[in-house]
C-alpha cells in the first residue's frame, strides 16, 4: 500500500481550513523535462505539463490558431443541411426568425446570426422567451406565431429537446434549424437540421463547444459553400469577440478550439469595434485590455441580467446593435438590472444556505427550495452552494405549485444527464442541460422524491465521497521571480477558466511588511522574503472569513501564502500582484 502524499509545505489545515496539495512526482518530472527541452521558465513549464502538452507541441500551444484547432464543420451531423438552408433563405430573401435563449450564450449566438445576415442586407426577427412567463427554450405559442410568417426559424442555444414546439412550427409550414450544445435525448425533434455536438448519435464531436461556437462553425460551413459557388461571405474573424464572450460566460471548458476562439476573440474585442461590447466595458469600468476574467465576471453577468430579472432580449439586442447611443442606453439599463440582481441574489442565498446547512453539506447533493425565490437567480445561488460544499447543488423557486430550479455541478459529476434521467422517469415535469449545469421544472409533490432520486444518482457518480476542498498548488515561487514578464509568459499558456484553472503558486515563509483593509472586506498587503524582494498582494473578501483578521493582526508572524499572479495597471505602471487565496502559519 502506497504511503499517503504529504501536504504541500506541510500545510494540513490552512487559515481557511484547507489542506494544500502539490504536483505529484511524475508531474514534477514532466515539468522539469519540459523546461529542459524548451528553455521555458519553470512556472510556465509546470503549467504546460499539467495541461498534458508534450515538449514538441509547446510552441504551438502557446500560440493557438483556429487553423490548427477548429474542427471541420462537416464533421457534425446535419451541418451541411443547416448551412445550405440558411443560404437558401438568404438567396430567396425569405423572412428568418432567430429564437434564442435568454443567457449570454443565447444572446451572443443570436447576435452572430444577426451580424452575419446583416451583411447580406437582411434583418431577422429576434425572439427571446421570457424566463418567468415562458421558461427555457421554444414553446408552442411562440413557435406557431413565428411560423405564421417566417419560412425559416433558427433556434440557437436551445431546441434539442423541444419536440412539440418544433412540430407545431413545422405543421405551419416553417423549416426549423437547431444550433445547440445541450445534451440530446434518445430521439431528435422534427427539425430540418439539428446541429449539436452533444447529440447522442454523435461520436468524437467537439462537445466542449458552447452554442455560439456551434453557430460559428455553421457560419464557417456557410462560407465554404459560398466559396464553392464562387461567392464571398462576411468576415468571420471580426465576429470572434462574441464567441469568446459566450465561451467564457457559459463556463465552457477552455480546451481544444475553445482556447483559440477565446484568444483570438479577445484580440478582436480589444479593438473596440462592436458598440455593444464597448458600452458594456465602459459601464463595467474596465480600464485594461479584456481578459477572461472581465468576460466572466464583469461583462457576462450584465448581459445575463436582462434575462434574469428584466427584459429577456436586452442582452441580445445590446450585442447585436450597431448604434453607439443605443448600445450605451442598453448597457446602462443592464448595469442597473445587474445591481438589482445582486440584491435579490443575496436574499435568496441567505435562505438557501441556511436550508442546505440544516440538511447537511456532506450529502451527495446539496439543495434548497422555497416559495417566491426569483427563478432568475436560482442558478447563481446554486453556484454559491456548490462552491461552499464542493458538491452538486440545486436551488428551486416555487410559485404556488409550480417550481423552477437550476443546478450546478462539480468536476467529474454529470448533472445534466442525471436531471434528464429524472425527466425520463417522470419524477420531474422537464429538465436537461449539460455536465456542469442543468435546469428543471417540477411540482411541489415531486420535490422530495425528485431530490432523493437525484441525490442517489449523484452518489452513484461519487459525489458523496468528495472530501473537503483541497487547495491545489502548482509550484513554489519567490517574490523576486514574480515579474510582469513571467506573468505575461504564464498568460500565454492560457486562457484560464473552466477546465483550465489558472496556476496557483505558493510563496513560502513570507514576512508581512504592510497590511490594510480596502473597501468593506478586502485586504491589501505588501510581503517580502527577508532578502530584499517584495510583492504586492490583495485578498478579496478576506474579512468575510478568517484570512483577513489573521493577516491584518499578524503580530510579526510569518506565513506561507498561496494565490494566483496577476498584472496590476496603475498610473501607467504595470506591476506583479498576487491575488491571495489562502495562507498558513510558516
Image (spheres, rainbow, N blue to C red):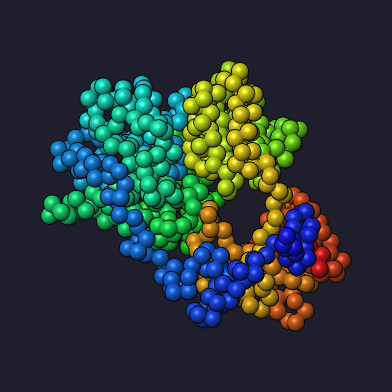
Quadrant location of the N terminus in the rendered image: bottom right
Name the foreground residue: 90 vs 294.
Answer: 90
Q: Nearer the viewer, residue 344 or 199?
A: 199
The answer to whether residue 332 is seen in the rendering is no
- Above or below: residue 86 compared with residue 224: above
Residue visible at 57% across and 37% down in the picture: 407
Q: What residue lies at 68% left-to-right and 75% top-to-bottom?
A: 478
Task: Farthest residue to the right: give it.
Answer: 555
Residue 275 or residue 75, whichever sits in front? 75
Left or right of 511 in this view: 243: left
Give x and y (percent) for residue 409. 58, 42
* Left or right relative to 4: residue 241: left
Extreme front residue here? 1
Q: Where is residue 531 drawn, in percent x and y? A: 75, 82
- Which quarter of the rendering shows the C terminus? bottom right
Residue at screen point 53% across, 75% down: 34
Label count reads 0
What residue is drawn where x is 22% and y is 25%?
Answer: 173
Q: Residue 298: percent from the left, percent from the top?
A: 53, 51
Q: Toward the viewer: 58 or 278?
A: 58
Query: Where on the picture, by quarter, is residue 487?
Result: bottom right
The correct choice, above or below, for 345 with respect to 208 in the image is: above
Q: Outermost residue toward the left? A: 230
Vertical order, 141 against 92 (above or below): above
Asked if one can make out residue 424 in the rendered structure from this viewpoint, the answer is yes
Residue 272 point in image, percent of width and height: 39, 58
Amino acid at each position: 500500500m502506497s504511503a499517503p502524499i504529504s501536504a504541500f509545505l506541510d500545510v494540513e489545515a490552512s487559515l481557511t481550513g484547507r489542506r494544500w496539495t502539490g504536483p505529484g512526482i511524475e508531474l514534477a518530472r514532466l515539468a522539469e523535462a519540459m523546461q529542459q527541452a524548451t528553455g521555458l521558465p519553470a512556472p510556465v513549464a509546470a503549467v504546460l505539463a499539467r495541461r498534458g502538452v508534450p515538449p514538441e507541441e509547446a510552441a504551438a500551444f502557446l500560440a493557438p490558431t483556429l487553423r490548427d484547432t477548429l474542427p471541420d464543420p462537416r464533421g457534425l451531423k446535419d451541418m451541411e443541411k443547416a448551412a445550405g438552408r440558411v443560404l437558401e433563405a438568404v438567396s430567396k430573401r425569405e423572412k428568418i426568425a432567430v429564437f434564442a435563449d435568454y443567457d449570454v450564450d443565447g444572446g451572443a449566438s443570436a447576435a452572430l446570426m444577426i451580424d452575419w445576415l446583416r451583411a447580406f442586407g437582411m434583418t431577422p426577427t429576434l425572439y427571446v422567451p421570457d424566463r418567468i412567463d415562458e421558461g427555457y427554450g421554444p414553446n408552442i405559442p411562440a413557435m406557431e406565431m413565428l411560423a405564421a410568417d417566417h419560412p425559416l426559424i433558427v433556434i440557437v442555444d436551445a431546441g434539442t429537446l423541444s419536440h412539440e414546439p418544433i412540430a407545431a412550427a413545422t405543421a405551419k409550414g416553417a423549416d426549423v434549424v437547431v444550433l445547440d450544445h445541450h445534451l440530446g435525448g434518445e430521439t431528435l425533434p422534427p427539425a430540418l437540421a439539428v446541429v449539436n455536438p452533444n447529440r447522442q448519435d454523435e461520436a468524437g464531436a467537439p462537445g466542449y463547444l458552447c452554442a455560439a461556437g456551434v453557430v460559428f462553425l455553421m457560419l464557417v460551413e456557410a462560407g465554404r459553400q459560398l466559396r464553392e459557388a464562387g461567392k464571398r461571405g462576411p468576415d468571420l474573424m471580426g465576429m470572434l469577440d462574441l464567441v469568446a464572450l459566450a465561451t467564457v460566460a457559459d463556463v465552457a471548458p477552455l480546451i481544444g478550439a475553445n482556447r483559440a476562439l477565446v484568444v483570438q476573440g479577445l484580440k478582436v474585442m480589444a479593438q473596440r469595434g462592436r458598440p455593444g461590447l464597448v458600452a458594456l466595458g465602459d459601464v463595467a469600468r474596465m480600464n485594461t485590455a479584456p481578459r477572461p476574467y472581465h468576460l466572466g465576471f464583469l461583462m457576462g453577468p450584465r448581459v445575463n441580467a436582462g434575462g434574469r430579472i428584466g427584459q429577456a432580449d436586452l442582452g441580445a439586442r445590446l450585442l447585436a446593435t450597431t448604434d453607439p447611443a443605443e448600445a450605451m442606453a442598453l448597457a446602462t439599463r443592464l448595469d442597473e438590472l445587474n445591481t438589482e440582481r445582486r440584491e435579490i441574489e443575496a436574499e435568496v442565498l441567505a435562505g438557501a444556505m441556511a436550508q442546505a446547512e440544516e440538511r447537511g453539506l456532506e450529502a451527495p447533493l446539496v439543495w434548497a427550495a422555497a416559495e417566491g425565490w426569483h427563478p432568475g437567480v436560482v442558478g447563481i445561488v446554486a453556484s454559491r452552494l456548490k462552491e461552499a460544499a464542493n458538491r452538486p447543488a440545486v436551488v428551486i423557486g416555487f410559485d404556488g405549485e409550480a417550481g423552477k430550479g437550476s443546478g450546478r455541478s462539480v468536476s467529474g459529476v454529470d448533472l445534466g444527464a442525471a436531471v434528464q434521467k429524472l425527466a425520463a422517469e417522470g419524477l420531474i415535469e422537464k429538465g436537461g442541460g449539460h455536465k456542469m449545469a442543468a435546469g428543471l421544472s417540477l411540482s411541489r409533490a415531486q420535490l422530495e422524491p425528485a431530490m432523493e432520486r437525484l441525490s442517489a444518482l449523484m452518489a452513484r457518480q461519487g459525489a458523496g465521497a468528495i472530501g473537503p476542498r483541497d487547495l491545489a498548488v502548482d509550484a513554489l515561487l519567490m517574490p523576486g521571480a514574480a515579474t510582469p514578464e513571467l506573468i505575461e509568459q504564464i498568460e500565454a499558456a492560457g486562457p484560464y477558466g473552466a477546465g483550465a484553472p489558472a496556476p496557483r503558486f505558493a510563496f513560502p515563509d513570507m514576512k508581512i511588511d504592510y497590511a490594510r483593509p480596502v473597501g468593506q472586506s478586502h485586504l491589501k498587503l505588501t510581503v517580502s522574503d527577508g532578502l530584499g524582494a517584495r510583492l504586492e498582494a490583495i485578498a478579496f473578501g478576506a474579512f468575510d472569513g478568517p484570512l483577513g483578521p489573521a493577516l491584518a493582526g499578524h503580530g510579526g508572524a510569518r506565513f506561507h501564502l498561496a494565490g494566483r499572479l496577476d498584472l496590476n495597471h496603475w498610473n501607467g505602471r504595470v506591476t506583479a500582484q498576487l491575488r491571495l487565496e489562502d495562507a498558513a502559519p510558516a
